[in-house]
Image (tube, rainbow, N blue to C red):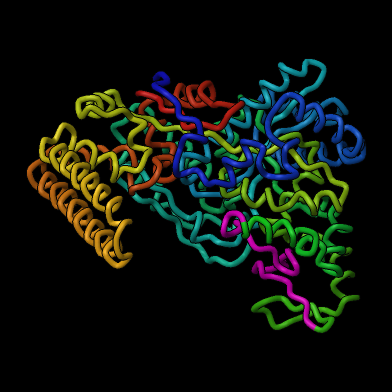
């Protein structure tokens, strides 16, 4: 496996404009939160002043408890112990508890987080930087995470949805036996099946299963996992949650930022609600406040102001942050320098700095995660034989197809030449028309438009004719596109990591680690 090429995000049409503007320092107020040595030094200084020793000790105790049921590596042990020191910081990513990791970018974002932590520990030799994976155990959309796909299979587990997904118990193992059949003849297929059986043993919760799985894959890299669904962690958020219940400060402080983003980019990733908290019981439901009464959506009970504040103080674990409040939770309980996430995550983080400022909470450096694409040498050879480069498959592909089919086309060249002649002739007539009645000039202009439109129609018909004539080439092109973009989207959003691990094992993980770009987000294309 070796790097074939890479494409910076700034050159990819599909990357959102907001992300590109952020990377080019065009998003006002976030210039100090782009990945750079200077910005990281500022973040180190800010966290040293605000993340105090009692918080460190509590974090250590929580993580020690949460890792007690897995056999941690020496590097994990050193990282865990290091968190008690004022010279230790974290780099964090987070993700849902997808079945067997879900799409493969789950793997990429964790390995990039590990790589960045390792690089920063080297670049700041008097500091220690620890990689952390935030488990989104409180999400309630089980249908979003209960499956994964391979090249030839779709695997799903069943359970009742509605509550915190981390507490859902694994009750079926049919997907394991079906998975084993698909990968029985691969080099590392047996290892994958054993890993799946260990993690998704009947009776395990999804939080336990994910912890086992992530531990097996990344424990030797020193990664620590944190489950925010913990009363000790949430106790630190009582003042913030209280303020949100009483004053709806998140929505109010980010209002102008949200309006500005909508004006510039047409939308925001997540619209703040009046109260950005859920109530977590058997289900996870939004909290709303009307006329002084705090109701739980789709539940028959409610609270007075006094009652809900009492509930918060006595049972902080029952209050669950939504997507916009979770970053505040994370940055409160971790000595964090940087957060690595996908484009969608970055876009909702970019709504939040005014709220962080109000809380006097340091806002982290934001790192849009890089992407990886694994293609076979055979696929690259087919691309070259068509006279294309792999980069062409990430451009406007309709235009790429058109240019390929009409390359060196004599009829197209003749049409272009004729159009230029006619355009020049009409321009000469228009120049003379200025000396006569204006209505004549209007007639000439309309006739010019009509005739030039006919050339547009002829080019469209020519392309249609060439698609029929070059049907075989067109089919090869479309098949290649689907090989590179399974399901007509990026490979990393479709395939599970098992597709690559089955043939290459842990060497593939090491390749992903080595190729992870930590300075500038890019699409990294690796030949296998």
Relative image position of residue 233 (x, y in whole percent): 81, 49
Res 167 seen here: no
Magenta stretch containing residue 281, yes or no? yes
Residue drawn at (71%, 76%) of the image: 296
Q: Residue at x 80, y 21 (%)?
A: 127
Quarter of image, res 403: top left
Horizontal and vertical percent position of residue 221: 62, 25
Residue 447, compared with residue 342, is above or below; it is below
Q: Residue at x 78, y 15 (%)?
A: 125
- Indicate left or right for 125 with 105 as reference: right
x 42%, y 41%: residue: 496
Q: Is residue 275 left or right of residue 199?
A: right
Quarter occupied by the N terminus: top left
The quadrant of the picture occupied by the C terminus is top left
- Residue 306 in magenta? no
Q: Nearer the viewer, residue 76 or 488?
A: 488
Given residues 295 and 142, the one toward you in this image is 295
Q: Residue furthest front?
A: 435
Residue 309 picture location, percent across and down: 88, 69
Above or below: residue 17 compared with residue 195: below
Give the image quarter of residue 445. Answer: bottom left
Q: Is residue 135 visible?
A: yes
Image coords of residue 28 (percent x, y): 72, 45
Q: Nearer the viewer, residue 29 or 189?
A: 29
Q: Which range is magenta?
A: 264-290
């Amino acid at each position: 496996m070796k790097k074939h090429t890479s494409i910076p995000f700034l050159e990819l049409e599909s990357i959102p404009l907001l992300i590109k503007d952020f990377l080019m320092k065009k998003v006002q107020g976030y210039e100090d939160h782009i990945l750079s040595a200077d910005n990281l030094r500022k973040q180190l200084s800010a966290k040293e002043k605000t993340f105090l020793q009692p918080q460190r000790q509590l974090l250590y105790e929580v993580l020690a408890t949460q890792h007690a049921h897995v056999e941690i590596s020496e590097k994990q042990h050193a990282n865990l112990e290091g968190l008690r020191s004022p010279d230790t910081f974290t780099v964090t990513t987070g993700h849902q508890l997808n079945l067997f990791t879900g799409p493969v970018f789950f793997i990429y974002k964790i390995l990039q987080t590990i790589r960045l932590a390792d690089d920063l520990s080297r670049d700041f030799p008097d500091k220690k930087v620890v990689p952390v994976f935030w488990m989104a155990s409180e999400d309630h959309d089980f249908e979003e995470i209960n499956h994964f796909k391979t090249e030839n299979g779709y695997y799903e587990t069943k359970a009742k949805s509605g509550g915190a997904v981390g507490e859902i118990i694994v009750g079926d193992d049919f997907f394991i036996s079906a998975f084993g059949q698909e990968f029985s003849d691969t080099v590392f297929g047996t290892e994958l099946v054993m890993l799946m059986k260990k993690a998704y043993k009947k009776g395990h919760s999804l939080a336990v299963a994910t912890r086992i799985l992530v531990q097996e894959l990344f424990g030797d890299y020193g990664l620590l996992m944190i489950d925010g669904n913990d009363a000790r962690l949430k106790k630190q958020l009582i003042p913030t949650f209280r303020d949100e219940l009483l004053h709806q400060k998140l929505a109010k402080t980010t209002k102008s930022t949200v309006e500005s983003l909508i004006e510039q980019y047409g939308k925001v990733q997540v619209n703040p609600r009046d109260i950005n908290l859920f109530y977590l019981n058997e289900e996870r439901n939004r909290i709303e406040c009307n006329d002084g009464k705090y109701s739980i959506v789709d539940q028959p009970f409610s609270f007075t102001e006094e009652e809900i504040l009492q509930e918060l103080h006595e049972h902080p674990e029952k209050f669950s942050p939504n997507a916009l409040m979770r970053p505040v939770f994370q940055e409160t309980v971790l000595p964090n320098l940087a957060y690595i996430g996908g484009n969608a995550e970055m876009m909702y983080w970019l709504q939040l700095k005014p709220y962080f400022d109000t809380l006097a909470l340091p806002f982290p450096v934001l790192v849009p995660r890089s992407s990886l694409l694994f293609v076979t040498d055979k696929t690259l050879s087919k691309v070259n034989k068509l006279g294309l480069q792999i980069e062409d498959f990430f451009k406007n592909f309709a235009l790429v197809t058109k240019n390929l089919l009409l390359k060196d086309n004599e009829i197209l060249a003749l049409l272009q030449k004729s159009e230029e002649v006619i355009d020049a002739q009409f321009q000469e007539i228009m120049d003379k028309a200025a000396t006569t009645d204006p209505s004549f000039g209007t007639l000439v202009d309309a006739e010019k438009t009509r005739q030039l439109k006919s050339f547009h129609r002829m080019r469209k018909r020519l392309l249609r004719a060439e698609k029929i004539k070059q049907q075989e080439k067109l089919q090869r092109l479309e098949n290649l596109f689907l090989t590179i973009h399974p399901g007509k989207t990026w490979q990393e959003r479709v395939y599970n990591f098992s597709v690559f691990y089955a043939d290459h094992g842990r060497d593939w993980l090491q390749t992903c680690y080595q190729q992870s770009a930590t300075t500038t987000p890019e699409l990294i294309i690796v030949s296998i």
